[in-house]
Image (cartoon, helix red, strand yellow):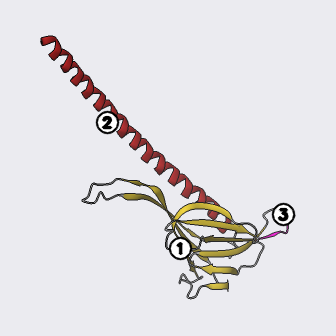
Amino acid sequence: MGVILDIIGSFVVRAAIVVVILNLMINLHESLSKSTDRITLNESITNAGQVIDADIKLAGFRATKDFAIAQNNNISFSYGDTAILNTSIYTIRYYISPTTPAAAHKILYRTINGAAQLEIARDILSFSIVYYKVDGDTLATYGTNVTGIKSIYITLVMESKMTERTYQGPAGDTLALTVKWERHFFPENL
């Protein structure tokens, strides 16, 4: 009888050890998944910000200083080629995908000279632009062929499609990871 109790006891201890190890592995996997999601989201918004940064700094260089489109989530401007002998003019446009009630996440697009749209970032919650005049006041009206813009403030917010459990509420509340990129540009050529 004592041997049977020893065998049962050893099975219970082994089962407890297996449960502890499985719980540890599940927690490590969740932590790795959350960290990977954070890193991916940060890299995505940083890459999108670098593309926007490179273009906006050149606005008005060897080209018209007017903005073909100056809206709160849509911008189009021109700049000339930075090569000395090249006289090409590029018209750059940034805009987000049309909003539909079912799609909370949008896509940020970039076009060059009206050609095919290039996808710059996905899972965009908001892309907002504020235009400032030389005296520091915001532009009163947005539209097309806008003049007098001296600085541009851009905010880009992305949200992960994965959700992180932040606390256990009565309904199992979850919160999605969001990141924000914002920059105030003062293009030298405007």
Amino acid type indicated by mark 2: Asn
Please say if the residues under marks 3 and 2 sit with CB atoms less than 8 Å apart: no
In the depicted view, which residue is nearer to us: 37 or 60?
Answer: 37
- Provide the secondary structure element on which disc 1 rests: loop
Image mark for residue 23: 2
Task: Pick whichever, 78 or 113, lies toward us.
Answer: 113
Reply above or below: 121 against 188.
above
Three-letter code for the amino acid on which mark 3 is drawn: Ile
Helix, strand or loop at disc 2?
helix
> Which residue is pictured at 31% across the width and 59% down the height?
173
In this rendering, would 125 be left or right of 24?
Answer: right
Residue at position x 17%, y 14% in the image? 4
Q: Which residue is mark 3?
A: 84
Residue 122 position, x and y percent, is: 57, 61
Q: Residue furthest left?
A: 1
Residue at 37% over, 35% down: 25
**C-alpha span from label 1 to label 2:** 41 Å
